[in-house]
Structures are given as structure tokens and as C-alpha cells.
Image (cartoon, rainbow, N blue to C red):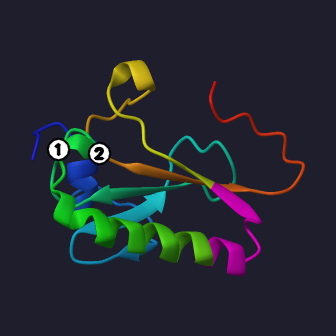
Amino acid sequence: MENDCIFCKIAKKEIKANIIYEDDNFIAFPDANPRADSHTLIIPKKHYKTILDMPSTLGNEMLDAIKSIAMDLIKQGKAEGFNIIINSFEPAGQVVHHAHVHIIPRKKGDRLKILE
């Protein structure tokens, strides 16, 4: 854990968050600065600076989390589709230096521009 990492603090439940998904290695919660309604972040509970630092053995579990959350958003009518975004390093837009996945719900005609 990085001492000042907000995501580590959320994972350890030192900072309150509306946890919408949790398994042995990942948790998910709403993005504090959402690009769309129900924009969700998935983070590993253990600190990894980027996805490149995560062990490959976590890949299937991370994909299961993405699929579960995305399907829930669709079933709840909050999405007709979705974008999955992983920003790695500052030039790619990573702000919090703890690996995380963005699930951004989409609806036809939403005019949302993701890569800006």
C-alpha cells in the first residue's frame, strides 16, 4: 500500500465508498468525477501502480468483475452499451496511481466523447 493512495484507503475501508461489487481481490464503486451516470471504477484491493504491475493471474477475476458490473448496468437500464477504459501512466490520463478500470455506461445518442 502506498501511504497516501486514496484507492488503497477505500480498499481497506478506511474511507467510505458506495461499494457496488466486491470479491477476494477487487472492489468497485462509483467514480467521484463521472463521465456518465453510473460510471464505475474497479480497483484491485492490493496496490499496483498500473495494470502492468498486476499479476496476470488476476486477469480472469478482473474480467469477471467487469462482466458482472456491465451486465448489471444493462439489466438495470442504466446502459445499452459500455466503454471499458484503463489509463496507464500520466500521459494516458492516469490520475490516481493505483491500477483501475473505468466502466462507462453508454446509451444510443448520448453524444459522450470519451477520449478527450
Q: Disc 1 marks which amino acid?
A: Asp
The first of marks 1 and 2 along the sequence is 1
Query: Is residue 13 visible to the viewer in this orientation of the structure?
Result: no
Circle 2 sits on which residue? 99
Is 80 magenta? The answer is yes
Q: In what element is the residue under mark 2?
A: loop
Residue at 34 percent across and 65 percent down: it is: 62
Up the image or down, 81 lies above or below 1; here it is below
Numbered disc in front, either 1 or 2: 1
Residue that appears at 16% across and 49% down: 47
Q: Residues within 10 Å of mark 2 (few under 14, many from 20)?
A: many
Give the residue at x 42% y 51%.
Answer: 101
Give the amino acid at mark 2.
Ala
Residue at the top extreme? Answer: 91
**Per the image, is 28 magenta?**
no
Q: Are marks 1 and 2 in contact (CB under 8 Å)?
A: yes
Residue carrying label 1: 53
Q: Where 102 sits versus 44, above or below?
A: above
Q: Position of residue 102 (x, y in %)?
A: 49, 50
What is the crowding at mark 1: few (fewer than 14 residues within 10 Å), some, or many (at least 20)?
Answer: few
Q: Which residues are magenta?
A: 72-82
On the image, the x and y values in percent for residue 82 come to 66, 57
- Judge whether 113 appears above or below 71 on screen: above
Would residue 89 be found to the left or right of residue 8 on screen? right
Residue 108 in percent (x, y) is at 87, 55
